[in-house]
Amino acid sequence: MVQKAKILLVDDRPENLLALEAILSALDQTLVRASSGEEALKALLTDDFAVILLDVQMPGMDGFETAAHIKRRERTRDIPIIFLTAINHGPHHTFRGYAAGAVDYISKPFDPWVLRAKVSVFVDLYTKNVQLREQAALLRLQLEQGVPAAAGANGSGGGSAEPAGLLAELSARLAAVEEQAEALSKQLDESADAAAVATAAHLERKLNGLRRALDALEPGTGNGVVKLPNQE
């Protein structure tokens, strides 16, 4: 079972948080509330989030300041931020949002369908990245355990069947992720934000690197010593 992604909703008005929950509930993900910038930063210390919906106008620490703190932290700097605002002070105000690290800037009242679609894109990207990291971690673990056993089989073949079956299983799992990532990339080609397209391209490069590593481990392709792609 794929673990649900977490979406952080940040707004000082309870009625706005309730409205966001109603709009995004159809995505069937975990929605986490924060009523202030300080509360949002606290939540980000312990949990991983697919995307952050951040109100601009909040008492105390506003959305711009909150975003600046998020982007300064190594753990959270790559989390997409969608700014929500009830006011529009023109291009300068919008530019300030993008300069603070936002991937999108939506004015209230917003179209629920549009907001849900935008959030869905980042949830899908997050899910694919999680799956990729899990596959890479499993591959590393099994290579550490399986390759020495196969090498020590002394030609008897007793240790080779299990690694071969493992490679086939990992290849099939990776193929499923590749298929989902390809479908997502096609959806992003025409309509998505530049940040989402760049993230999808980064994911594709990671998948290609992992596929090359798996292919190099197939019998007859070399000595089986492969440097796996960095998943950090």
Image: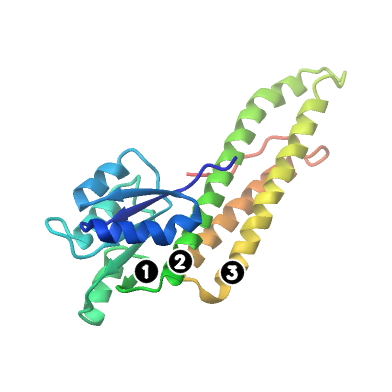
Mark 2 burial class by Cα count in 10 Å: few <14, some 14-19, many 20+: some
Height in image: 136 above or below 34? above
> What crowding class fits label 1: few (fewer than 14 Cα within 10 Å), some (14-19), or many (20 or more)?
some
Secondary element at tag 1: strand
On-image quarter of the N terminus: top right
**Does residue 119 sit above or below 36 in this rendering?**
below
User: At 83% across and 17% down in the image, what residue appears?
Assistant: 154
Name the residue that disc number 3 marks: 187
Q: Residue 173: x and y, percent?
A: 69, 44
Secondary-structure class at tag 2: helix
Q: Amino acid at mark 2?
A: Lys
Q: Which residue matches tag 2?
A: 118
Which disc number belongs to residue 104? 1
Among the 4 quarters of the image, the one containing residue 102: bottom left
Provide residue 124's location: percent of width, then percent of height.
53, 56
| Residue at the extreme right of the image, as rendered | 156
- Is there CB contact under 8 Å for labels 1 and 2? yes
Going from N to C along the chain, the mark reached first, 3 or 2, is 2
Mark 1 or mark 2: name the one nearer the start of the chain. 1
Q: In 3D space, how far apart are the residues under numbered discs 1 and 3 (Cα atoms)?
A: 17 Å
Asked whether disc 3 touches disc 2, contact meaning CB atoms under 8 Å apart, the reply is no
- Disc 3 is placed on an element classified as helix
Name which of mark 1 and mark 3 comes first in the sequence. 1
Nearer the observer: mark 3 or 2; the answer is: 2
Neighbourhood count class around disc 3 (C-alpha, 10 Å): few under 14, some 14–19, many 20 upward: few
Q: Amino acid at mark 1?
A: Asp
Q: Nearer the viewer, residue 84 or 48?
A: 84
Q: Amino acid at mark 3?
A: Gln
* Mark pair 1, 2: CA separation: 9 Å
Name the residue located 87 percent from the left edge and 18 percent from the top edge.
156
Q: Nearer the viewer, residue 168 or 25?
A: 25
> Nearer the observer, disc 1 or disc 2?
2
